[in-house]
Amino acid sequence: MTISADPSSAPLRSMGIVGGGQLAWMLAEAAEGLGVDLHVQTPNGDDPATSRASSVVVAALDDVSATRLLAERCAAVSFENEWIPLDALAPLAVEGVQFVPSLQALEPLVDKRRQRQLLDALHLPTLRWCCLEETLQPPEPPLQGDGESGDAETVSASGEGSLAEWLQTRPAHDLQPSEPCLPEGFAFPVMAKATSGGYDGRGTRLLHGQADLEALLAEVKPSAWILEELVRFEQELALVACRDRHGRVELFPLVQTHQHRQVCDWVLFPAAVDHAVEAFARNIAASLLTALDYVGVLSIEFFYGPGGLQINELAPRTHNSGHYTIEACQTSQFAQQVRIVTGQPMGSTQPRLAGALMVNLLGTAAMASPEDVEDRLVRLRQLPGVHLHWYGKRGQRPGRKLGHLTIPLQAGSEEERRNECRRWLEQVRAIWPRFDSPAAARAA
């Protein structure tokens, strides 16, 4: 295998990406603009990024032998998503393959349990959480002096012999686990999340009560799920952070995100929050990058409300909330990732627009034919000043991300910007409804 050169010595002219979806597609576009060859590993030969890649390795994302082949074609390898087989890739890193971010930096980020443990260890504000396993607590023997109605024997808090004697004296039904219950301090409703593999609402479950908890436990492996308190919030916010190999940090502006059915619907830049809130978010981002010795692009989702700013989730990659940067900032999140991976100087993250609205275009059952889809795209392209990004995916099932729009905003004040945003959303959704909107079935 070719051992990658040290990217700190001179810029590289090639990179690999594990994943071939829309994020890799936009990364390939940025790579073209920077004169970098992008090689892709993806399970389907017609995935979006394959149309722009210098070469394609068609293989599952967790196929390590395919990643080895990918690494032989390029100088450094990055990732489109966080579904990364770290242990399996470790031998490649030992052999000299340059992974950006490093596997060590990714280790606490690739599942939600480890993310929560990291945030707690760094004393960063996040949601109260617990492992789903904690709802399955076996019965505990009484401590000495507790007594049990009519029982002559009590069990010492220490001493294995007394515990064994107590177990032998108990009726069988007393030794069965009690019904599952939330740990102390938690109350329904709570949010259940799979520790890995979840995205866009998949791998999450809102538990309203005991019946929901028991149903979830009957369906999943408890060790692979966590529970989070359900918080009240006023806004959902996001920030894309970048750090290069020399420890330099660049942060994109804080934005407001709006979710519909747990899928990003639209993003508004800039977020309408106090300067102190944005400064706190930026400090959190810089702290995370430094603590992890993280090299690459890291995305952070926040809740903001009565409890202040709280971290919701981390994504060790480019992010849907950062698509607006293609038009709205001096350097896009995708160009920044290419620059970091190939050892080029990072670009400025300063805005070049006063404001912008990004709207996701998801598949909807209302679109009965390819001709109908094309007609809607023509109408979207006719909207003045709108930038359409169409990913070219095959298949347009409801809820699938097919493209996005970025719309420059002209308003100066927060109130005017909100009104401008509302008007644009009405225009766009009249042409391309949300995927489960009742209007979808009636829209022309």
Image (cartoon, rainbow, N blue to C red):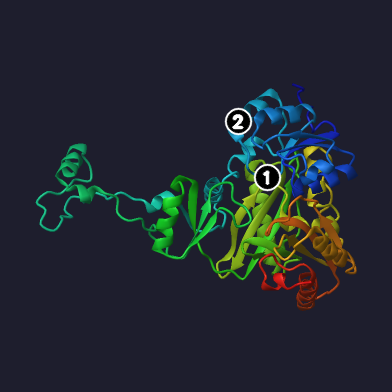
**Residue 214 visible to an observer of this rendering:** yes
Earlier along the polypeptide chain: callout 1 or callout 2? 1
Q: Is residue 117 left or right of residue 142?
A: right
Q: Quadrant of residue 236?
A: bottom right
Separation of marks 1 and 2 at Cα, in angstroms:
16 Å
State the image coordinates of residue 173 (x, y, percent, origin top left).
21, 50
**Viewer-nearest residue: 411 or 37:** 37
Q: Which mark is residue 81?
A: 1
> Going 74% across and 46% down the picture, which residue do you hit?
21
Secondary structure at badge 1 equals loop
**Viewer-nearest residue: 272 or 137:** 137
Q: Which mark is residue 193?
A: none
Classify 429 as above or below 398: below
Image quarter where the C terminus lies is bottom right
Amino acid type of the residue that numbered disc 2 sits on in the rendered structure: Ala
State the image coordinates of residue 129 (x, y, percent, origin top left).
48, 55
**Viewer-nearest residue: 349 or 423:** 423
Q: Total marks drawn?
A: 2
Q: Which mark is residue 88?
A: 2
Q: Is residue 348 left or right of residue 153?
A: right
Mark 1 touches mark 2? (CB < 8 Å):
no
Bin the neighbour count of mark 2 within 10 Å (Cα to Cα): few under 14, some 14-19, many 20 and up.
Answer: few
State the image coordinates of residue 211 (x, y, percent, origin top left).
40, 62
Secondary structure at badge 2 equals helix
Image quarter where the N terminus lies is top right
Q: Is residue 231 left or right of residue 217?
A: right
Q: Quadrant of residue 54?
A: top right
State the image coordinates of residue 34 (x, y, percent, origin top left).
89, 42
Bin the neighbour count of mark 1 within 10 Å (Cα to Cα): few under 14, some 14-19, many 20 and up.
Answer: many
**Residue 329 visible to an observer of this rendering:** no
> Going 90% across and 69% down the picture, which residue do you hit?
384
